[in-house]
Amino acid sequence: MPLVSGKAKKVILGNLGSDNPVFVQVLGICSTLAVTNAVKNTVVMCLGLIFTLSLSNLTVSLLRKWMPSRIRMMVEVLIIATYVIIVDIVLKAYYPDIWRQLGPYVGLIITNCIIMGRAEAFALSNPPGLSFVDGVSAGVGYSYVLLVIAVFRELLGAGSIWGVQLLGEWWENWAIMVMAPGAFFMMALFIWIVKGLIIKPDADGKGTS
Amino acid sequence: MSEMAAVLGVLFAAVFTNNILLTNYLGMCSFLGASREVKTSLGLGAAVVFVLTCTSVLNWLCYRYILAPLDLTYLRFIVFIVVIAAFVQVVEMIIERISERLYAALGIFLPLITVNCAILGVSLFMVIREYTLAEAFGYGLGSGIGWMLAILAMAGIREKMVRAKVPVGLEGAGITLIIAGIMALAFMGFNGMVTLN
């Protein structure tokens, strides 16, 4: 089983920590910034992303031997888009409120660089089982960063988490946190803390290219 | 006449008050990656303006005359992304012919325009907001110009920043995000000038 092999373990740990898609590779942060002003939306977005990422990785890996390399990008995009449409339809049917709030950002999962990046960098050269594990773990690595940011933004910006008011009357909402600049600052702060304190600064410069 | 005013309104709103990058966070990946030199970002910005304008019009036509009558609007993601990908391929060939240097400088970022969220995002916003063809054109053009403005400003700042001492851990992406945040603050000053519904 690929789930217990040493290689799979390495993949999982890499995606959660030293090779994390968000704060090390700085990929896919468009949606990171856009949906993190409320925890609820973030969770839905993350589940959609994990679903799309793991299944598209699996599919790309299954098809990798038959894909002509010249048109592989196109094929990958179509596979990804198919799964995103499933997410979109399910959301629209069962959670229309959240669907409306997320607006175009569900569709924008297609252009989330993480998914394309994992397909190109991993699924094209690895067996299906391992690719699936890679997809799930990269998705989880992305999700927990988003959740941390979302918790702070909603708490500071609206005094609540998951729509439940936590801070009392005395709390003055930091409106800036739920607006655009707050997202940029939170993300920068997060990268700073993780890179500066946890990952020792020998891997700098890796993040921007 | 009022049609013209509506288009201009959308265009200005897309450039300033609803900047695609600074308020909708779209196109961040290439924004962070390609904003080190003014020259590169100018080329990429120009390519984005061109692609955005053309694809928003093309996608509007596809949506209105193919998808909507056939009740296939749930296929819009696939159709939009295919139109965008095909179009980017054409632009890539053109740039390769015109300027070898620009082609070498943009390198990996040209194919990445396909997965530049700004391009798809504009098409999706356009559908949600139910723009007319002219408004879609204005929105595409405005968003492209807004994106180019942001990346050019960022590249200008980053070129100056080469000599600055940045705290450990903030180099690269971190400091760029902080600058983007300050830019977003500055752009908030345009709020209320024109509104986008």
Image (cartoon, coloured by chain):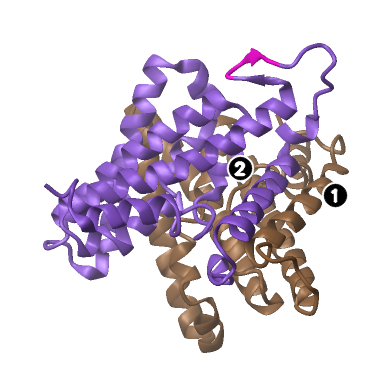
Residue A175: x %, y % from top left: 79, 29
Q: Amino acid at mark 2?
A: Leu
Residue B20 as seen in the image, left or right of residue A111: right
Separation of residues labelled 1 and 2 (CA atoms):
18 Å
**Residue B53 in view:** no
Give the chain letter at badge 2. A
In the rendered image, the vertical position of residue B18 relative to residue B162, given as above or below: above
- Residue bounds of the magenta highlight: A162-166
Q: Quadrant of the C terminus of chain B?
A: top right
**Residue B55 in view:** yes
Q: Who's the residue at 50% across and 55% down the image?
A: A27
Q: Who's the residue at 53% across and 70% down the image?
A: A203
Which color has been applied to chain B in this rendered view?
brown
In the rendered image, the vertical position of residue A27 relative to residue A68, given as above or below: above
Give the chain letter at badge 1. B
Residue B114 lies in the magenta-colored region:
no
In the rendered image, the vertical position of residue B186 relative to residue B111, given as above or below: above
Label 1 vs label 2, nearer the camera: 2
- B54, B1: nearer the viewer: B54
Which color has been applied to chain A in this rendered view?
purple
Residue A31 as seen in the image, left or right of residue B139: left
Q: Amino acid at mark 1?
A: Ala
| Residue under label 2 | A33
Res A182 → quadrant = top right
User: Secondary structure of the magenta portion, mostly?
Assistant: loop
Residue A88: x %, y % from top left: 39, 29
Q: Quadrant of the N terminus of chain B?
A: top right
Q: Who's the residue at 52% across and 35% down the image?
A: A104
| Residue under label 1 | B186
Report helix, strand or loop for mark 2: helix
